[in-house]
Image (cartoon, helix red, strand yellow):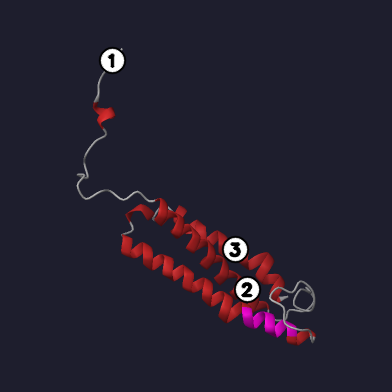
Amino acid sequence: MGLCMCTTVAFPFGAIIGTGWTCLPCVDIDRFSAENRKRAIYLFASLFDFGCICLYLPLTVFCAVADGDTWMPYKNYGSCWSRSDRRYLVLGAAAGICIGIGLLGFLTMLIHDKTYIRPSPDEPANKKDPLSTSSHYVV
């Protein structure tokens, strides 16, 4: 059940958390400094790597050993897919949540970092758009 839990339940849940935290009213992602953006990108990438290497990889090895099969990176049959056998359920949940949060959080922060328009140092912060100050149209 570990691989089933990882794929069908925990990864989508982690993906929602990985992108959903930016929609909270208390989070203004535009106010993150460039240094904090990079830290968040590295944090999410590290969480993804941890989920893949330290949790998912051992899960696939344990499932292969439990079934007496050869190792496969993504096995879609056997005791780790059976709902009657709760083998490695917690490991699968932890792997899916870490991979989901890490992957989608990394992509969200990377996209935001690349599309964020940084104000130029020469432009004053309170400068208005010249088109918005005109009071009439010229015909």
- Cα distance, mark 2 to mark 1? 64 Å
Which region shows up in magenta? 57-64
**Residue under pointer 3:** 13
Identify the image quadrant of residue 99.
bottom right
Judged by depth in the image, the label closer to the viewer, 2 or 1, is 1
- Total numbered circles: 3
Of the residues under marks 3 and 2, which one precedes in the sequence?
A: 3
Residue 110: x percent and y percent? 45, 59
Of the residues under marks 2 and 1, which one precedes in the sequence?
A: 2
**Residue under pointer 2:** 93
* Residue 50 lies within the magenta run: no
Would residue 28 be seen by someone viewing this image from the given angle? no
Identified at 53% across, 71% down, the residue is 48
> Residue 138 bears which disc, if any?
1
Of the residues under marks 1 and 3, which one precedes in the sequence?
A: 3
Q: For label 1, count other residues whose C-alpha is less than 10 Å away and answer few (under 14), some (14-19) or many (20+).
A: few
Q: Secondary structure at mark 2?
A: helix
Residue 40: x percent and y percent? 40, 66
Residue 71: x percent and y percent? 72, 82
Mostly what secondary structure, the magenta segment?
helix
Judged by depth in the image, the label closer to the viewer, 1 or 3, is 1
Q: The residue under label 1 is which amino acid type?
A: Val
Q: The residue under label 3 is which amino acid type?
A: Phe
Q: Relative to 39, say whether 68 is above or below.
A: below
Identify the image quadrant of residue 56.
bottom right
> On the picture, is 17 further left or further right than 90?
left
State the quadrant of the N terminus: bottom right
Q: Which residue is more in the foreground, 36 or 122?
A: 122
